[in-house]
Amino acid sequence: MIATSGIGTMLEYYDFFVYVALTATLTHLFLPTEDKVVATLLGAATFGISYVARPLGTVIFSPLSDRIGRKKTFVVTLVVMGAATVAIGCLPTYSAIGVWAPAALLTLRIIQGIALGGEYASAVVYLVEQSPRTKRGLITSILQSTASLGLLLALALSTLLKGTLPEAAFETWGWRIPFLVSAPIVAVATVVRMNMRETPTFLALKETGQLAKSPLSTALKGWEAWKSILLATFGAQGATSVSLYTSIVYMLYFLGDVVKADTGTANLCLGAGILIAAPFYPVFGRLSDRVGRSRVMAIGIALWMCVAYPAFAGIRSAAASQAWVLAAALITVLAVLTAMIMAPLPAFISERFPSQTRTTGFGIAQQLGNILFGGFLPLIALSLVNLTGNPLAGVLYSIVSLAPCLLVTVLWGLKHDRPVPVSSHLTAPDYVTR
């Protein structure tokens, strides 16, 4: 159950993040400009555009998950994501078709955003409804680690290809391989997912005739519904978006465009941090089962805010002296603290919504948090660096962005740490009353 859900989700994040791993190459091939600053900002903007599309994926797919089933929905999203990724690998470049190349790339990035907007909520809810209450944090935290592992896989493959192929070969056809290899893997993952069984919670709702007729309108109706959405958006999801996209995504831009590390070295340092941090996700997830989701997240947010500025300053100094082991160690510290923030999130958010609208509510909160806090963070951070001339201006923006997330988590989230009692009128074992 965990393996089949996690592998599929990791593949979707791999498909989504392979663009990040190859940003410099894709920017050169699809968004040519003599101004390197403009080129970098355009590449970051193309990354952010996909986040604008993710809410559309939530609006399309999350209500379907609540109406027709969790399993069917994340089979469809996996196929859509895989098709868009393979299509990117087949695109002609700017030199071949001119402005149609960046237009096609942008369109496919939007399709990827739509697919990912529908994937994660369905996968999380599937695991939540298959898991005992006392282990939800542990089980869903394993799925949560797939985002960074997907990026790690993308980094590893792109670094290997760039390091072994001649530069001309890599820019001609080598960059296409990380996109094209997705096809057979997605095909296998799709078959595996099709053979998974539906959750007992959804089946109970269906059998008792208690499925929501309009999950989207129901999820947005009333103060209690909005309270859950706002708590998740400005607390858990906002903090996850800032910490993840600063420690992982923006870190790549920082290493390559701010401290001028070569691509291979930057990928190795970041990859080491991601790999070492990965086992900490279930550790923090299990801890959240014992002491409460918000307590773990609040401590993680506070520590990340304290550590981020000196860590980025230390990475900059280490890069100047070529002390890459120290740089990797500092990246690892940030990655571990990010895991502490991220690990409890799936169980925490899913437990805020009733079974009938659980996927829809989760998806709405996640996408609002991503848009407000995460999607355009690399672009904003890089813009601040270039406007101020301060190489650490970007991380200062991230620290400030986390302040409201910490406030909401401490003042509001701690009240919701304990599971809500099970409703007595529904046979589904994990129905959450309002």
Image (tube, rainbow, N blue to C red):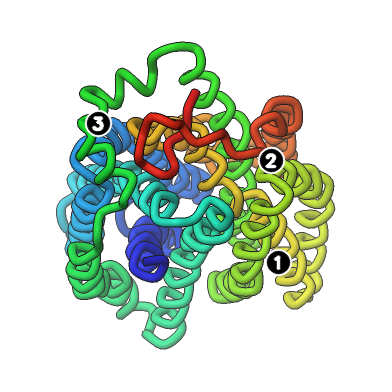
Up the image or down, 32 lies above or below 194; here it is above
State the separation of the CA atoms marked 2 and 3: 30 Å
The 10 Å Cα crowd at callout 2, few under 14, some 14 to 19, many 20 or more, is many
Which structural element holds mark 1? Answer: helix
| Position in image of residue 341 (x %, y %) | 66, 49
The quarter holding residue 171 reads bottom left
- Give the mark, 1 or 2, whose residue is nearer the N terminus: 2
- Is residue 371 rendered to the left or right of residue 333? left
State the separation of the CA atoms marked 1 and 2: 23 Å
The quarter holding residue 359 reads top left
What residue is shown with label 2?
A: 294
What residue is shown with label 3?
A: 211
Q: Amino acid at mark 1?
A: Thr
Up the image or down, 395 lies above or below 312; here it is above
Residue appearing at x 19%, y 57% in the figure: 79
State the separation of the CA atoms marked 1 and 3: 44 Å
Residue appearing at x 41%, y 44% in the figure: 429
Q: Nearer the viewer, mark 1 or mark 3?
A: 3
| Position in image of residue 243 (x %, y %) | 64, 47
The 10 Å Cα crowd at callout 1, few under 14, some 14 to 19, many 20 or more, is many
